[in-house]
Amino acid sequence: MPLSALAASPSPTPEPIDPARVTPGVLGLLSLLFLVVAVFLLWRSMTKQLAKIEFEGSVPVDPEPATGPDPAAESDAVVPDAGVEATEAAPDEPRPSD
């Protein structure tokens, strides 16, 4: 067959694409699975990192509570001074208005 005969023959026209038959296929499934696994691993890592953080003012949890009196409660108690009048407020407390 000569080359001129091949060049003269018309090329076949492609069939129209049916939108109802277009699917994501294997590549779409693998992409979705990759994203799900990546999000799960990031979530687990974030949970571990947040568990390591000690927030200011947080009290560590004691698994066995003390059975005796709390020594911190006794040392933090404020004993009023007998020489201070009742109308005087401490420096960190607001003064009552007259």
Image (cartoon, rainbow, N blue to C red):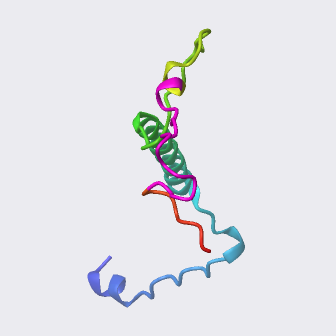
Q: Position of residue 15 (x, y in %)?
A: 60, 79
Q: Is residue 81 magenta?
A: yes
Reply above or below: 91 against 15: above
The answer to which of 20 and 53 lies nearer the viewer is 53
The answer to which of 9 and 22 lies nearer the viewer is 22
Residue at x-position 52% and y-position 40%: 80
Q: Residue furthest right?
A: 20
Q: How many marks?
A: 0
Reply above or below: 16 against 27: below
Q: Quadrant of the C terminus?
A: bottom right
- Left or right of 56 on screen, residue 28: right
Q: Residue furthest top?
A: 67
- Span highlighted in magenta in the image: 74-90
Q: Quadrant of the N terminus?
A: bottom left
The answer to which of 96 and 60 lies nearer the viewer is 96
Q: Position of residue 10 (x, y in %)?
A: 45, 88
Q: Position of residue 61 (x, y in %)?
A: 54, 25
Q: Position of residue 68 (x, y in %)?
A: 59, 9
Reply above or below: 82 against 19: above
Q: Residue furthest left?
A: 3
Residue at x-position 27% and y-position 82%: 3
Residue at x-position 50% and y-position 44%: 43
User: Magenta part mainly helix, strand or loop?
Assistant: loop
